[in-house]
Every structure is written in structure tokens, then in C-alpha cells.
Image (cartoon, rainbow, N blue to C red):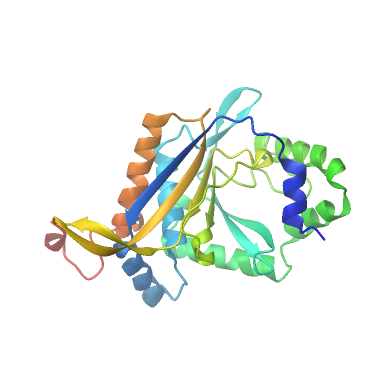
Amino acid sequence: MNSTRRKLAIATWGSPHEGNIYGKLSVDAAEALAYAEHLRKTTGEKVTIGHIVGKAIALALKQAPGLNGRIVLGKFVPHATVDVTFLVALENGRDLAKTKIERADEKSIADIARALGRGARSLRDGKDAGFEKSKGLVRSLPAWALKPVVWTTGFLTSALGISAMGLEAFPFGSAIVTNVGVFGLDEGYAPPTPFARVPVYILVGAVKEQPAVVDGKVVPRPMLTITATIDHRFIDGAELATLAKVVRGGIERPWTLDGLAHAPGTSAQDTN
């Protein structure tokens, strides 16, 4: 029997015809791992690399407003807020759902972890009314009938901002983040989801010890690979480089994502 995810995929995709940009960023994750551990101890939230990447993406979207929007009838329309969606694995990875973090650029990393944890629990406990409603519709319709329903729902919710079929207005925001590293995958690329009408898809890979050059010496470092699939209609290569710079800086100095001047336990002089 097809899962909800598989059935929705069959009804969503055809032959590829989008113009997409694919990019990969390898970042030293030592500071991010340390900061995640610090936040776990000080806030009690289960902060992970995925939450840190999500906050970095939100701030990057804030600085690249040409990505923070949607295309409606051939015209770019900006979003009023920076909202980031995280994919949530259900049934041991056999199905997928989503939790949207509104105004993610304004939230702390711990706040993002808290909101995502709350949303994930609601989904896994079957208490997310919108998801349960849309899941019931997906399972009740044959794939051939589901395709026009999915397209129409996507246009209404993600382009026009009208709630429909259990989905709120702009249900995916401007970016979708999925952490495949939790499944042990080093890297991968997310396929664009037409009905989501999202310009940016981010995959967070597993942190792996890899050789890196530090102060002229080759040493093992915990490296993180982040990959992106970006709609070329929204951004070009030069703008993508700016986006990558913001994300890299956030991962290498994660405390700056929370507005801190230096790493916890250090002074401003220590970071100079």
C-alpha cells in the first residue's frame, strides 16, 4: 500500500521542466555542535544542527528579500514575514509532514527548537487537525484525481494565500528544510515540490569527521554538508553566493544567530 507521501509524490511530479540551481556548502561544524550542546544545557530544549541551519536560512532570507516570496501569474510577490518550514518524519520515515515556523528570523534557536518539537509531537500524536484532514483527502482519492486537486490547492494556499483543504495560507513559507543527517545520509538534493511554490529547499546532511586544513596542517574536523535546490526565477548565481556567505557565517559562528557578540564562555577579546 502506498504511503501518503508516496501517493502525493505520484500525483505531484511529472517530467522535470523547472530551471533550478543546485549548490553545496561544506562547513566546519565544531562551533555549531558546541553551541547546540550549550543551548541544550541552558534551555532544556533538544537543539540540533538542523535548528541552527534553519535559523541561518531565515536570516539569509531576510538579507535576500528576492527569495522571500512567491510568483503569482508571472509576477513576484514578496511575503510579509520570513517563515521557514521543517519536514517531520512520521512512521519511522515512511511518511512526511511539515511544521512551519513563522517569523523564524525573529526567533532564537531555542525558540525554533521548542516550536518544532511541539509541532512534531502534535503530528505524531495525530492532533494536527490540518494534517489529518489533508491526509484523509490524499488517501481517499486515486492518484489521477488527486493531481488537479493538489495543483489547485497549492495555487490557492501557496500563491493566493487562501486557506483550503486543511492547509493554512502560505503553508510552506519561503523555504523548506529537511534534516537527512538524522538518517545517516551525508548529503543529497531535495526535488522542488510544485504545489508548495517555495523557492528554496535545504537538505542538512550528517556531520562527519573529514580531513581539513587548519593553520596549514591537515587535521580531522567535524564537517557538515548543506545542499540547496533553488528556483532560478528568484535568484541568480551571484545572489546565491551572498546567501551561502550568510549561512556559512551563521554555522561557523552560531552565537551570532542569536544576536550574541561572542561565543558563550568567552570574552570579546578572546574572539579577536
Residue at 87% over, 42% down: 145
Asked whether residue 259 is in view, the answer is no
Quadrant assignment for the C terminus: bottom left
Rendered position, 182 above or below 233: below
Quadrant assignment for the N terminus: bottom right
Residue at 61% over, 47% down: 172
Where residue 96 appears, as percent x and y from the top left, is 67, 58
Q: Residue furthest top?
A: 74
Where residue 142 appears, as percent x and y from the top left, is 87, 48
Residues 76 and 198: in front is 198
Left or right, 32 with respect to 107, comes to left
Residues 129 and 8: in front is 8
Left or right, 28 with respect to 205, comes to left
Where residue 101 appears, as percent x and y from the top left, is 55, 54
Asked whether residue 94 is in view, the answer is yes
Q: How many marks?
A: 0
Residues 51 and 15: in front is 15
